[in-house]
Amino acid sequence: MLILGIETSCDETCAAVVEDGRRVLSDVVATQTEVHRKYGGVVPEIASRAHLEALVPVVAEALDQARVRMDGVQAVAAVHRPGLIGSLLVGLTAAKTLAWLHDRPLIGINHVEAHIYAACLLREALPFPCVSLVVSGGHTSLYHSAGPRRHELIGATTDDAAGEAFDKVAMLLGLPYPGGPSIDLAAERGNPHAVEFTRPWLGAGSLDFSFSGLKTAVLYHVRGQGADARRRRQALTDRQIADVAASFQECVVDVLAGKTLRAAEERGAERIIVGGGVAANRRLRERFLREAARAGLELLLPPMRFCTDNAAMVAGLAYHYAQAGEFAPLDLEARA
Ligand code: KG4
Ligand code: ZN
């Protein structure tokens, strides 16, 4: 079964064709990074307009690369929540239009569920039950996952998402947009124990996350505190920037890995899935690989290109909705 997937929840315009939930026949991503760079973040109105311009060529390219036409596609799937409302509407409306014109069923997909499913692409067997961690620009959530469509939330952020913390700390350090990959790169040359930031464990047993205090700690470390803060705010050397980036990253990874492994132990899970843009972080991948091996757990870490936003994870997950006969009406609404 061939499914066309569309993803436009934030600032990447994505389309993909996936066969039977596994075989990725095409996976096209048009990024808007350059458009938003000068603002230091995604500007929602500009993102929607850029999706409008990119979407038709991106869908055409995804069909071309998969060597199919719409009459060879059995269903059309789109992310309808959560995300930037204007951006979601562009992809969802396009999917509805294609479904209606070609008389194909529509499938509405949750972006966070799709990030979990990214780890299942290209695999023979589904890895459930497992504990899943989604770390992206908008989410830091832990789930106990019973199947591709069944996720019980067992921990979440009480403030900033992990990716948001990476982006904001990068800005504090004067590193280029987008922040996550810049911290990843800068940290390579730094000492992860140069600054021992307090780990936000939030009390024994908590599976929730909080990164806003850490962000403030980085701010104070960089700028100093108190009345003479302005005077003490000097240009940091490259060495200091690398050290703070590495120390911040180590702190985030400690907490993410610590809580995910503890959740797996508590739930008696044998597998862990990690997904979302922050799962592309090299230090995070290294640490999860090492710690999962030490705990005797199987780790499912999507290849980098399936960690950040893409439509292959959407078309892949949609297959399981189609198998269950869960289709969406053409008046399906987008939800921010
Ligand atoms: O999943 P994603 O592409 O979009 C959302 O659903 O939000 O995640 C984007 C987030 C951004 O905050 C970005 O800075 C972060 O993922 N990110 C990274 C890395 N690559 C992307 N964070 C840390 N290290 C990376 N290598
Ligand atoms: Zn995402």
Image: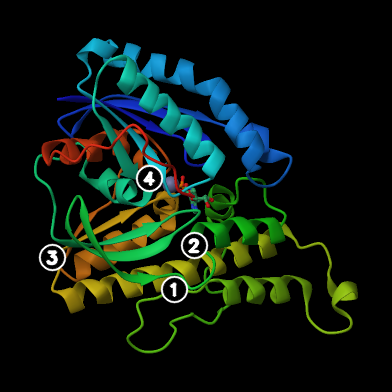
Q: Which residue is mark 3?
A: 270
- Counting from the top left corner in percent of width and height, residue 328 is at 27, 37
Residue at x-position 27% and y-position 68%: 291
Q: Which residue is mark 2?
A: 162
Mark 3–mark 4 Cα distance, whole angstroms, equals 21 Å
Mark 2–mark 4 Cα distance, whole angstroms, equals 14 Å
Residue at x-position 60% and y-position 35%: 47
Residue at x-position 31% and y-position 45%: 114
In the rendered image, which quarter is residue 68 located in?
Answer: top left
Q: Nearer the viewer, mark 1 or mark 4?
A: 1
Q: Are marks 2 and 3 in contact (CB under 8 Å)?
A: no
Counting other residues with Cα less than 10 Å from the Cα at mark 3, is it few (<14), some (14-19), or many (20 or more)? Answer: some
Q: Are marks 1 and 4 in contact (CB under 8 Å)?
A: no
- Which of the two labelled residues, at mark 3 and mark 1, occupies the earlier sequence position? 1
- Counting from the top left corner in percent of width and height, residue 144 is at 22, 66
Q: Which mark is residue 307?
A: 4
Q: Which residue is mark 1?
A: 209
In the rendered image, which quarter is residue 274 located in?
Answer: bottom left
Task: Identify which amino acid the numbered label 4 is placed on.
Answer: Cys
Mark 1–mark 4 Cα distance, whole angstroms, equals 20 Å
* Disc 3 element: loop
Q: Is residue 316 visible?
A: yes
* Disc 1 element: loop
Mark 3–mark 1 Cα distance, whole angstroms, equals 23 Å
65 up-or-down from 138: above or below: above
Task: Identify which amino acid the numbered label 1 is placed on.
Answer: Phe
Give the residue furthest to the bottom.
Answer: 204
Does label 2 point to a residue whose CB lies under 8 Å from ligand 1? yes
